Amino acid sequence: MIVIFDVEGVLIDGEFLPEIAKMAGKQKEVQEITDKGIAGSINWEQGLRQRMNLVKGVSFSQCVEASNKLPFMKGAVEMAEELRKLECIMIGVSGGFSLLGNRVRAALGFDHVFSNELVFHDGRLIGYGLLVNANKRQILDTAFGDMLKGTKKVAVVDGANDLDLFDLVDLKIAFNAQKVVRERADILIEEKNLGRVVKAIGSDSSLFG
């Protein structure tokens, strides 16, 4: 079984770019664009470009600090341990950045975490490299190909930019999600506790056997 997670807002209790924006004095502007993107009222790539333009110039050390201070979601470590016992392949797919994605992979023991790259020059943020775009399913199709077809799949997401993952999976879980996500989900989790994910997967007999 493959379990696919969004990273920020699901595995991580918070968002990376708003933390960087605090350091750049652009918190209000970046949060407004972030909220529009999560709600699906602005094109995702356009919103990312706008937010990145606002925080250019922050230092590499500030970005590392922002990444490291974001807490894991309640129950994340325990959930990962239980999913490993079920021999699940755990994948994170994030429109965010590898500073945070690599931390998630190492701490939770995920098999793969796909994310974008921040670009620094002379220790200052100048831009980004895009690997994961608004179509998160695309990176999974190209990375795993036919492996996806013969394997049961679960997606745990929160934002409108994650909805294409729902088209790929057998069980759709909305985790403290936007309305448009909840409307398409099989299971709603309305509390910040990833332990509920393990219960949801374990209770669905169609995923096993």
Image (spheres, rainbow, N blue to C red):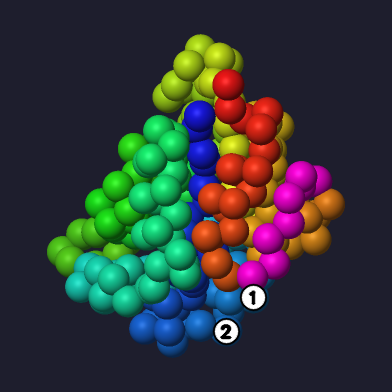
Classify mark 2: residues with Cα within 10 Å, few (<14), some (14-19) or many (20+): few
- The residues colored magenta run 184-191
Q: Percent from the top left, x then y, of residue 192?
A: 58, 70
Question: Which secondary structure dominates the residues rendered in magenta?
Answer: loop
Q: Nearer the viewer, residue 198 or 182?
A: 198
- Disc 2 marks which amino acid? Lys
Residue 186 included in the magenta stretch of the image: yes
Residue farthest toward the left in the current orientation of the protein = 122
Q: Which residue is mark 1?
A: 32
Q: Which type of secondary structure does the marked residue at label 1 adopt?
A: helix
Q: Nearer the viewer, residue 172 or 127?
A: 172
Q: If the image is split into quadrants, where does the C terminus sit?
A: top right
- Disc 1 marks which amino acid? Glu
Above or below, 15 against 141 in this view is below
Classify mark 1: residues with Cα within 10 Å, few (<14), some (14-19) or many (20+): few
Residue farthest toward the bottom in the current orientation of the protein = 25
Image-based side of 95 in relation to 114, left or right: right
Q: Nearer the viewer, residue 81 or 180?
A: 81
Q: Which mark is residue 185?
A: none
Location of residue 36 (image quadrant): bottom right
Image point 51% across, 12% down: which residue? 146
Q: Percent from the top left, x then y, of residue 31?
A: 58, 76
Q: Which residue is mark 2?
A: 28
Image-based side of 204 in relation to 103, left or right: right
Image point 52% across, 60% down: which residue? 195
Q: Percent from the top left, x then y, of residue 134?
A: 60, 43
Image point 62% across, 30% down: which residue? 207
Above or below, 10 against 147 in this view is below
Residue 57 visible to an observer of this rendering: no
